[in-house]
Amino acid sequence: MAVLQIVEHPAAVLEAKCRKVNEYDEKLHQLLDDMYETMVEADGVGLAAPQIGIDQQIAIVEIDEESGTIEMVNPEILETKGEQLGIEGCLSFPNLYGEVSRPYYVRIKAFDRNGQAYLLEAEDFLARAIQHEIDHLHGILFTSKVNKYIDEAELERYEEV
Ligand SMILES: [Zn+2]
């Protein structure tokens, strides 16, 4: 496995609409493994392929041990419900945090690394992370959804609460 370089904004690949994956081969497995290592190294809870310079519909999310590692290939949002307001950051925007409103619940369809389709329901922060990553695959950055930016001093106070 290898830690890859994270692409930071501005970069064309971050705003590109990603291509669908057609081959569930060893190369895809390797890429997912490398993306995982890169996300962990960067202390992130999610990573999308364009963030390592690859315009393909591949993303991973891991918010905690309980929900585990979620690998999403060609993910699609089937349904959303409710609303949540929370603070988001992005590995492609170091030290930038903002308040973003998103649906509270999401139901998705995606494929795993072997091309097996699956359905997944998520709520709260997991739903937020999944939606943030799927947005990346459509070239949508969280900064286009921020209501209000939060400076780091404010963020520390926020995290202590
Ligand atoms: Zn991001």
Image (cartoon, grey):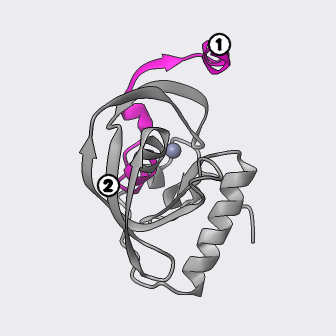
Q: In the shown orientation, is residue 142 left or right of residue 102?
A: right
Give the main secondary structure of the magenta stretch: helix
Q: Is residue 94 magenta?
A: no
Above or below, 89 against 30 in this view is above
Residue 65 x, y percent position in the rendering: 65, 53
* C-alpha gap between disc 1 and disc 2: 32 Å
Query: Label 2 amino acid?
Result: Arg
Q: In the shown orientation, is residue 42 left or right of residue 144?
A: right
Please give the label number shown on residue 107.
2
Q: Find numbered disc 2 in the image and state the secondary structure of the residue it sits on.
A: strand
Residue 66 x, y percent position in the rendering: 61, 52
Q: Looking at the image, which is closer to me, 123 or 131?
A: 123
Residue 4 visible at all: no
Residue that carries the numbered disc 1 in the rendered image: 157
State which quarter of the image contains the C terminus. Answer: top right
Q: How many marks?
A: 2
Q: Residue furthest front?
A: 66
Please give the label number shown on residue 86.
none
Category of crowding for the residue at label 2, using alpha-carbon neighbours closer than 10 angstroms: few (below 14), some (14–19), many (at least 20): some
Q: Find numbered disc 1 in the image and state the secondary structure of the residue it sits on.
A: helix
Above or below, 81 against 25 in this view is above
Q: Is residue 142 magenta?
A: yes
Q: Which residues are magenta?
A: 132-161
Residue 116 x, y percent position in the rendering: 41, 80
Q: Looking at the image, which is closer to me, 139 or 89?
A: 89
Q: Looking at the image, which is closer to me, 22 or 115?
A: 115
Query: Label 1 amino acid?
Result: Arg
* Quarter location, residue 101: top left
